[in-house]
Image (cartoon, rainbow, N blue to C red):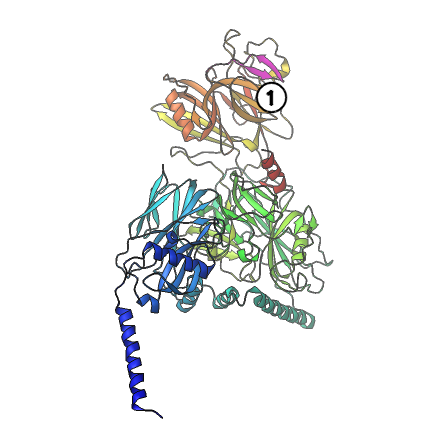
Amino acid sequence: MVTSSSIAWKASSLLGTVAALHLALTAPSRSTLAPDARARLARAVAASTRLSVTADDLLFERTRAVSLQDAVFGRALWFTGRARPGAPRDVYRAEIRLTPDGTLLGLSALSNLTRSPLGDDGPMVPEAAASPDAPRRIAVPSRAFGQVQSAFVLDPAGDTATEARLRREVTNALETGSRVGVARYDLRLDRPADRVSLRFVSHDRVSLDAGRRAWTLDLRALSTEPSEGATLSRQQRVDKPPVIWAVDTVRSLPFVGPAPIAWLEQHAFAARDWWHQRVYRWFGRRPPPAAVAEEISPDDAGRVIASGLGPARDPDWPPPVIAPPLGAADPGEGRWVNATPPWVRHLDGAPPAFYRTFVRLDDERPYTRVLLVAMDMRQLELGMQAGVEDPVPHVGPRGDGRIPRAPGLMPRVVGAFNGAFKTEHGAYGMAVDGRVLLPPQPGAATVVTLDDGRIAMGSWDTLPGLPSAVRSLRQNLEPLLADGVENPSRRGLWGFVLGGIETMPTVRSGLCADDRGHLFYAWGEETTARRLGRAMRLAGCTYGMHLDMNPTHATFHFLRVDDVAQRRYQHRALDGAMQSHGDRFLYYTLKDFFYLSLRPTLPAPVRGVAWTASRPQPAPAWMPGVTSLRVPLAPGREASVEALAADRVRLHLRAGRREPASTLVAEDRTFTPSPERPLLGAIELGVAASLAEPRGLCVGGRVQLPFVATEHAGHLALRDGALSIEAGAAVAPEVREALQGVLVRHRGASTGWTDAAVLPRQVLATTGDGRLLVVSGSLSGDELAALLGDLGASEALLFERASGAAHWTGDEGLRDAWPESAVFIEGVPAASPVMRLEGWLRGQRGA
């Protein structure tokens, strides 16, 4: 029975609750938390998240005062946390409810915004908010391996809206705890700094001070001032196709994980495989014949001029024919044909850089093929780039997901193909342009590119750290092929699927190298890893690695870019079954990839003057090994420069007829070239003034004239035809040919030698990129020093009494002896830059 007294009691209770709520929401707020309140909040956050958090690690997203409204509606908190005390920090965002005295009532929507296990991200530097309710940006330095390698700015205002707005909001909520998401701006330092300080100059401008270097970051223009030494970019979000987005989203849910998705993929691919086998048995279905690219026309507008000399027959290119593994061959099976579309740029006079063929390996599925693309790496450079989503780095920002906008690169780009697995599928190593995203794993199949343009494939060892000569690196699984042995590790699971290797025929791809130094891309639409490795072995490869798998991930595209900003480009997939669009490599792609570009045939211009390749060349002539330059100095004067690629020549020193040494014999003065290496020319380097004023000379393994220690003494030393310039007058015992000169440049800097007089001078120099320079002309000491600096000389040796004469086989018949001591130049055929990684790593360990 309801009485009037009970009604009155309930009414008064309701009024009391409403009054209390009103008082709570309108109670005075605290502008800041007291130190003990911040400490209490930090302890509560640490207990709730199981992270190590201190009071200094906390930062409210908005600067409005803490009030009892936050106990009801909550507010966003940023903080840096460590998995354990002393571990690197990550930046987190969470929604919390708390009282004005700092008591934590609840924490939800916890998100790790950086996820960099090897990078220490912090401390956070906030901007001065325009208003208490405006979300404020924060700037954070990222330290790894003892140095600051990058910095980033997080913006809680979120990402810009896209067409796939609903999918984006779901993704944002899962990744950041905020429906609008968190935008990220990344600054990459070309050289790491010991320490940096960050400061917001304004909402869109951030100052970064690294001691001797400093930059101002313009977040709106995505630029830095100065522009050298740092690169600023905004992390991109790419809208995935709905099916792929749904699969990745479900897979990322902690209560689902990858196993159910793998189970679904296995059964879907198994059903497709069952249907294809039945169609083949019932109707004899066979794949369409492979498209063959048209032959390159000599007048094609896509050419890049290398030299005026024509191609020569190459016994190693294209690769030899492959015998059909299943007996009777399909048309074209095992025979290499030109794969290059006619509009792809190429080197003038060179053979096609790409050849393709296919092999059939599956008795049960004779309609399936593994496509093979052979790539002539004498003509091509290999680059790597990380995707905007994968691999997820363990330190620093994610990748740009597009071919770099480096000056002069786009006109040379000719192709691109997929990379390897996601970070969640093994965290195999990756480094891009010297920046380590994921550290290399011992034993993993690896491909690396070096600063000097060489490429190495092999299994990584336990070498600590990344050698400084490594430009980029990518790993995936164990090798499919090593020293010609298929699956040497006896791995049974190639890809994160259920059921193993034989029950999962799907799209797979790989990369391999043969002993001739060619690289091969392998791709099969319905194949297994074992058959992919066998196709590599049949192609002649001795080492191979598995790359990405499954449709939309594995693809190879030929490219030509005329204007990337105006989206003027052409592309073509290697095969029509590849489910991908080629522009993904040019703009933004989710996953890492490799790209191919033509090797530069000439050095970069010096003082606006272009190099020429008019001298006699070592084979092949379409890749010049000798280039020339004439640099204006003053009216009526110029310097002549010859550049020799060190790996394309062998040098031999012979004594001049006028040298004052009495112990010289005929063999010391004359030179007989090898039949395998054509003689290209000779450079005269002067003679000693007299026995009273000698300069050191060693030929035939005997010192003919003494090496005299002077203030700027130096000498050239020849070891098996390879030249080096060394300081001092002491000649190493193993050196059989040496000549003394004046050391004018050492370790990239002037030695202090100078001479104001303008006199004829002859200089031999070496550069860090593997070139030998011969500089001659009438120059003053200051002019010579400036020119050597512009040429990038690291070591330089002056021969004061040299005539400056250079003789070439195209100019006149070369004699076997000259009045002055001379260096004779033999040509060496261009070798492929591809090598085995294990041998190179042993050399690094020994060094």
Q: Which of the pair 104/487 is nearer the observer?
A: 104
Neighbourhood count class around disc 1 (C-alpha, 10 Å): few under 14, some 14–19, many 20 upward:
some
| Residue at mark 1 | 735
Residue 159 visible? The answer is no
Q: Farthest front residue?
A: 5
Relative horizontal placement of residue 180, taking residue 439 as reference (left or right): left
Q: Position of residue 659 (x, y in %)?
A: 55, 11
Residue 846 to residue 40: above or below: above
Magenta segment includes 822: no
- Front-most of residues 817 and 147: 147
Height in image: 662 above or below 386?
above
Q: Amino acid at mark 1?
A: Val
The image quadrant where one finds the C terminus is top right
Q: Which residues are magenta?
A: 695-711
Q: Locate residue 67 relative to residue 545 in the image: left or right.
A: left
**Magenta-span inclusion, residue 710:** yes
Is 254 drawn above or below residue 199 in the view shown? below
Outermost residue, right direction?
A: 327
Identify which residue is drawn at 27% across, 75% down: 19
Could you say where residue 748 lies in the image, as x and y percent from the top left?
45, 28
Name the quadrant of the N terminus.
bottom left
**Residue 430, can we see it?**
yes
Under circle 1, the secondary element is: loop
